[in-house]
Image (cartoon, rainbow, N blue to C red):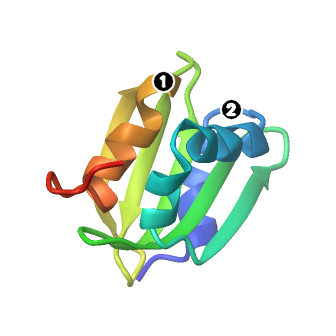
Amino acid sequence: MTNIQSFLDTVVERQFDVSETEHLLKATNINVWYSWGVEKISYYRKKDSGDALALWVTGHHHTGCLIITLGWNDTYTYYLLNQDNTVKKKVTDVYFDELQHRIDLDIEYISDYEF
C-alpha cells in the first residue's frame, strides 16, 4: 500500500493551474464528468516542484483515485490507482483536447451510451 502523498511526490513534474484542468474536464462535456461519479477532488502542490489534480471516482471500469499531472512537454500524464493506492494504469503524452475522452475510456465509457 502506497501513501498517496509519497506517490505524488514522485510523479509531479511542473506547476500548472490545477483548477483550469478541472474546469477543462467539466467544460468539455459535463455529462461525461458526472458519469465518473467524482466523490472527492484534491489539489496537490509540492513546494517549488509541481502540481497534481486528484479525483476519487466510481466509474464502470475504474473505482479509485485518478491523478493528473502536467509534464515539461506540455502534455498530461494520468494515473489510475487501485483502492490500495497501487498504480493500475499510467497514460502519458495526452494533449489537453483529448484529456477528457482518454480518461473516460479508462473510467466509464460504454459504447452504448450517447452524450
Q: Residue at x 48, y 23 (%)?
A: 97
Q: Amino acid at mark 1?
A: Asp
Q: Which residue of the protein is positioned furthest toward the top in this rendering?
A: 73
Q: Nearer the viewer, mark 2 or mark 1?
A: 1
Image height of 58 relative to 15, above or below: below
User: How many C-alpha atoms fall within 10 Å of the one at disc 1: few (<14), some, or many (≥20)?
Assistant: few
Comparing 97 with 48, the one in front is: 97
Q: Residue at x 68, y 32 (%)?
A: 14
Residue 62: image quadrant is: bottom left
Q: Is residue 11 visible?
A: no
What is the number of the mark on residue 97?
1
Q: Which residue is mark 2?
A: 14
Q: Residue at x 37, y 60 (%)?
A: 80
Distance from disc 2 to disc 1, alpha carbons, whole Å, reads 19 Å
Q: Is residue 61 left or right of residue 80?
A: left
Comparing 54 with 3, the one in front is: 54
Tell me where residue 25 appears, x and y as whole percent: 57, 44
